[in-house]
Amino acid sequence: MGTFHDHMGELHGITVVVRQKDGNTWIGRCHSEDAIEVILHDADQHVVSESDESPSDWLSRARQMGHWPRVSTIRIPRETVSSLVRLAEINQKGELPGS
Amino acid sequence: MPYPEELVAPMRKELTDHGVTELKSASEVEDFLGTDETSLVIINSVCGCAAGGARPGVVLSIQAETRPDRIGTVFAGQDVEATQKARDFCSQVPPSSPAMALFKGSDLVWFLPRHMIEGRDPQSIAFDLVQAFEEHCSSKAN
């Protein structure tokens, strides 16, 4: 027994990594994604210009232990997104699949 | 806001029917982890990945020859105080549910966060758990 939302798309409820075209990265629990936007809940962001940690180190740590839910909900415009993958697909070095 | 208990009760029972100790208060969590033994704490939840992966994965894993001395569970969103206390023992780890934490005494030695449960089948989750048991535990099942 559990709560399921199969009508919401295959990434609904899944923890994903959103890499943006400016190099910044979000991790969060995907609510929905379409041609307009990606909506995440309980999200955290890595901003390249503000962090001492590289994006891959940040992702590697998140892959191992999870991420801190610092932002309740974020709507990311689709035109700013360069990739959208499951956090579980990130390798141990914190690299995106295929990189 | 907690879900109605009649909805959650079967989700608790999936684990307690297999000998998992339910921890419903902070003091119960403190007592549970206040030994030198190895302990697995399952952070249960109402979501689909707990139903489809976490709980059946745990049930499979505890049939393994090597397993923790004690297996307990807290229910995120339901038993708030107990869940927070369990998370206090995992302070370096971001909160997630469902999740699983393996302790030696009160020291966290292994953690399976939610994103490593989402979308995975129970056998794969059990495999990860058994590997962790074999690395960190010495108790043999009777």
Image (cartoon, helix red, strand yellow):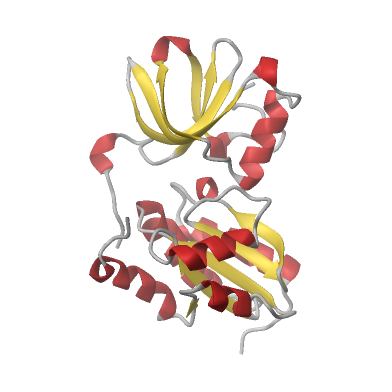
Would residue B107 be found to the left or right of residue B93 on screen?
Answer: right
Q: Give the quadrant of the C terminus of chain A.
A: top right
Q: Nearer the viewer, residue B113 or B89?
A: B89
Q: Residue at x 61, y 14 (%)?
A: A23
Q: Position of residue A43 (x, y in %)?
A: 49, 34
Looking at the rendering, in which quadrant would you find the N terminus of chain A? bottom left
- The spot of residue A80 in percent (x, y) is 47, 11
Q: Residue at the location (36% across, 53% down)?
A: B47
Using the image, determine if residue A17 lies above or below residue A24: below
Is B39 drawn above or below residue B132 in the view shown? below
Q: Kindly indicate the quadrant of the structure image that contains residue A13.
A: top left
Q: Is residue B122 above or below residue B15?
A: above
Question: Can residue B47 be seen at all in this image of the molecule?
Answer: yes
Q: In the image, A2: left or right of A45?
A: left
Total labels: the figure holds 0
Compare residues B35 and B37 and report the one nearer the observer: B35
Q: Toward the viewer: B129 or B82?
A: B82
Residue B97, given in percent of the width and then of the height, sits at 48, 54
Q: Residue, x 30% and y 34% (percent of image)?
A: A9
Q: Classify residue A68 as left or right of residue B122.
A: right
Comparing B34 with A93, the one in front is B34
Q: Quadrant of residue B41?
A: bottom right
Q: Is residue B57 visible?
A: no
Farthest residue to the bottom: give it: B142
